[in-house]
C-alpha cells in the first residue's frame, strides 16, 4: 500500500503553527468533517491513504484519510526541474467525513509532535541521499580528471583540482559521519535526535549541491549535457546537479535547520 504525508499548504510550509495551517477538521456528532488544501505532497496521485495535518480548534491533529473517500481529490503531478522520480501534487479535501478511528493516536492536539517526529525521519533520509549524490558526483569527477588529458597531462595533475577534491573528500566523510550519528540516535529511541538530524540534513544537502556543481565544471560541456546528439550517450552528472537542489528545500529548508541548531546553542528563550 502506498501512503502520503500531508503537512505543507500553499501558504504554510516551514510554519506549521495552528495560525498558519488552514486545513481544518471540525467535530460533528458522527465524527469529523475535513476541509483543506495541501501542496507538494509526495505520492498523493497514487496513494491509498494520506496522513493529514489539520487544525482542530486551537490545536493541530493528524488524521489518516482513505483517498477513496468522497471529497478527496489529488491534482496532476507537478513538473519539476529535478527529482522527477518522486511524484508530488496538490491534494484537496472537501467535506470529507471521518470517524474518531481516523484520528492518529486516538486523541486530538498531538498533530505537531507527530509531524515533527516524521520530519526527523525524513531529514535523516534526505541527509543520506545528499551523501550519496555527493559521493556519486565525486566518483565521476575523480575518474574523469584522472583520464582526461589537457596540455599533455591529466587534468588531475593541476593543483586546483587536487586541493578541491581533497576538501570535498573530507566533507563527504564528515557528512556521512553526521548522518550515521543522527540515525544511530534515532535507532536508540530518541524521536528527536537534534541537533544531529538538522546538522546532517543541512550539511549533506549543501555539500551535494556544491559537489554536483564542481562535477559539472570538471566535465565542462559534457557536464552540462543531458544527452549527446552525436551518439546519444547520456551526460554523466547533469541529473545529479538537478536532483541535488531539492535537498536544500524540502523536509524543512536548510535555513530552518540552522535555526534548529541555533536553538540548541542559545535555547528556546532567545531563538524562539
Image (cartoon, grey):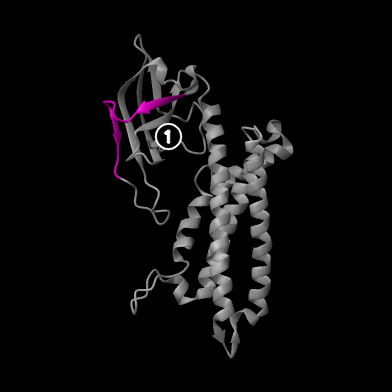
Q: Is residue 21 above or below residue 234?
A: above
The part of the image, by quadrant, that contains residue 167 is: bottom right
Q: Residue 28 in the image: x percent, y percent? A: 36, 12
Question: Which secondary structure, mark 1?
Answer: strand
Task: Tell me which residue sits at (57%, 67%) in the image.
Answer: 139
Q: Residues within 10 Å of mark 1 (few under 14, many from 20)?
A: many
Task: Tell me which residue sits at (43%, 26%) in the image.
Answer: 54
The part of the image, by quadrant, that contains residue 222 is: bottom left
Q: Please tell me whether residue 66 belongs to the stretch shown in magenta.
A: yes
Q: Residue 192 in the image: x percent, y percent? A: 63, 34
The C terminus: image quadrant: top right
Q: Is residue 151 above or below residue 55?
A: below
Q: Residue 11 in the image: x percent, y percent? A: 43, 37
The N terminus: image quadrant: top left
Q: Is residue 200 above or below residue 153?
A: above
* Residue at the extreme right: 266
Q: Please tell me whether residue 133 belongs to the stretch shown in magenta.
A: no
Task: Tell me which residue sits at (58%, 90%) in the image.
Answer: 151
* Residue at the extreme bottom: 152
Q: Which residues are magenta?
A: 62-76
Task: Tell me which residue sits at (56%, 74%) in the image.
Answer: 143
Amino acid at each position: 500500500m502506498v501512503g502520503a504525508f500531508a503537512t505543507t499548504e500553499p501558504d504554510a510550509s516551514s510554519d506549521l503553527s495552528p495560525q498558519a495551517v488552514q486545513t481544518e477538521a471540525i467535530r460533528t456528532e458522527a465524527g469529523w468533517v475535513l476541509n483543506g488544501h495541501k501542496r507538494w505532497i509526495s505520492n498523493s496521485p497514487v496513494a491509498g491513504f494520506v496522513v493529514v495535518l489539520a487544525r482542530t480548534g486551537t490545536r493541530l491533529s493528524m488524521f489518516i484519510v482513505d483517498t477513496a473517500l468522497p471529497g478527496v481529490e489529488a491534482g496532476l503531478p507537478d513538473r519539476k526541474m529535478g527529482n522527477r522520480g518522486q511524484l508530488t501534487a496538490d491534494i484537496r479535501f472537501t467535506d470529507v467525513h471521518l470517524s474518531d478511528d481516523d484520528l492518529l493516536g486516538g486523541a486530538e492536539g498531538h498533530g505537531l509532535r507527530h509531524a515533527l517526529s516524521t520530519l526527523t525521519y525524513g531529514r535523516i533520509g534526505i541527509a543520506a541521499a545528499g551523501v550519496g549524490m555527493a559521493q556519486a558526483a565525486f566518483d565521476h569527477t575523480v575518474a574523469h580528471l584522472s583520464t582526461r588529458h589537457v596540455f599533455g597531462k591529466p587534468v588531475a595533475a593541476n593543483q586546483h583540482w587536487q586541493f578541491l577534491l581533497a576538501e570535498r573528500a573530507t566533507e563527504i566523510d564528515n557528512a556521512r559521519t553526521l548522518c550515521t550519528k543522527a540515525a544511530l540516535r534515532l535507532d536508540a529511541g530518541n524521536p528527536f535526535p537534534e541537533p544531529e538530524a538538522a546538522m546532517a540534513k543541512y550539511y549533506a544537502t549543501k555539500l551535494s549541491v556544491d559537489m554536483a556543481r564542481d562535477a559539472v565544471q570538471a566535465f565542462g560541456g559534457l557536464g552540462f549535457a543531458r544527452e549527446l546528439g552525436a551518439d546519444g550517450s547520456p551526460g554523466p552528472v547533469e541529473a545529479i546537479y538537478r536532483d541535488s537542489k531539492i535537498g536544500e528545500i524540502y523536509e524543512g529548508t536548510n535555513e530552518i535547520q540552522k535555526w534548529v541548531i541555533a536553538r540548541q546553542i542559545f535555547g528556546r528563550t532567545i531563538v524562539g
